[in-house]
């Protein structure tokens, strides 16, 4: 889609969800977006894969607006992926089409950390039927594992799984700093 169409979608989402970004002015966000077409391209990929990106924070120290995927469930166009390329290579049969880390890198975004995922859950209820891979600490990944989160029974849960696993109901949520 064109940059203008994408900016209009983002603006409408921003205005409909003011509680996610109190004290942030859209005009300043838009100026940043218009000055950085590479970041707009990443936001377009987030949108095209069902992420519904929205501004959730402003980092004063870096003068950056932080976008998270705010779709109610893990983005549809980013499910059935193992965690990373190493896990993808380790699978002998029934390989998924890609991995969460590889797809995120190709989109120019990063996976949410556990801290960011908990922040997202503090501004709404997400992943009530699905789950999302999260950026896994190196000490866990080194042992073959990876982490993911979801929201069930009124609580945020962070779990572990083998990095090579993949499920139709598990995708990943991204973060982009603009």
Image (tube, rainbow, N blue to C red):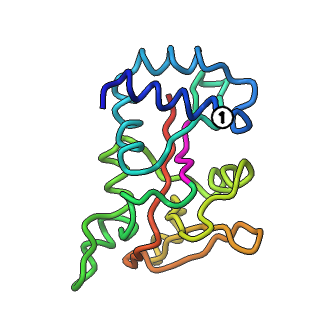
153 or 115, which is in the foreground? 153
Q: Nearer the viewer, residue 43 or 175?
A: 43
The residue under the point 42% across, 15% down is 35
Give the residue number, with chain letter if any, for mark 1.
57
- Answer left or right for 147 relative to 95: right
Quadrant for residue 58, please give it: top right
User: Which is the main secondary structure of the residues drawn in magenta?
Assistant: strand
Judge by depth and name the residue closer to the eye, 24 or 91.
Answer: 24
Residue 17, horizontal then vertical, whole percent: 66, 37
Query: Left or right: where does residue 54 sit relative to residue 57?
Result: left
Does the segment drawn in magenta span residue 68? yes
Q: Which residues are magenta?
A: 67-71
Q: Is residue 144 above or below residue 69?
A: below
SS of the residue at dot 1?
A: strand
Q: Pinpoint residue 172: horizontal percent, then vertical percent.
A: 46, 59
Is residue 9 inside the magenta stretch? no
Residue 161 to residue 134: above or below = below
């Amino acid at each position: 889609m064109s940059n203008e169409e994408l900016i209009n979608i983002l603006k409408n989402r921003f205005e409909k969800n003011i509680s996610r970004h109190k004290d942030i002015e859209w005009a300043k966000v838009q100026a940043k977006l218009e000055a950085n077409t590479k970041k707009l391209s990443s936001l377009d990929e987030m949108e095209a894969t069902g992420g519904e990106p929205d501004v959730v924070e402003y980092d004063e120290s870096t003068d950056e607006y932080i976008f998270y995927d705010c779709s109610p469930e893990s983005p549809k166009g980013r499910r059935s992926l193992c965690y990373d390329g190493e896990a993808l290579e380790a699978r002998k049969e029934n390989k998924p089409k890609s991995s969460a880390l590889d797809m995120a890198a190709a989109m120019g975004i990063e996976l949410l950390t556990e801290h960011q995922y908990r922040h997202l859950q503090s501004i709404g209820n997400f992943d009530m039927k699905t789950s999302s891979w999260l950026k896994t600490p190196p000490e866990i990944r080194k042992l073959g594992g990876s982490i993911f989160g979801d929201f069930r029974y009124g609580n945020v849960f962070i779990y572990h799984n083998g990095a090579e696993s993949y499920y139709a109901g598990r995708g990943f949520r991204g973060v982009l700093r603009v």
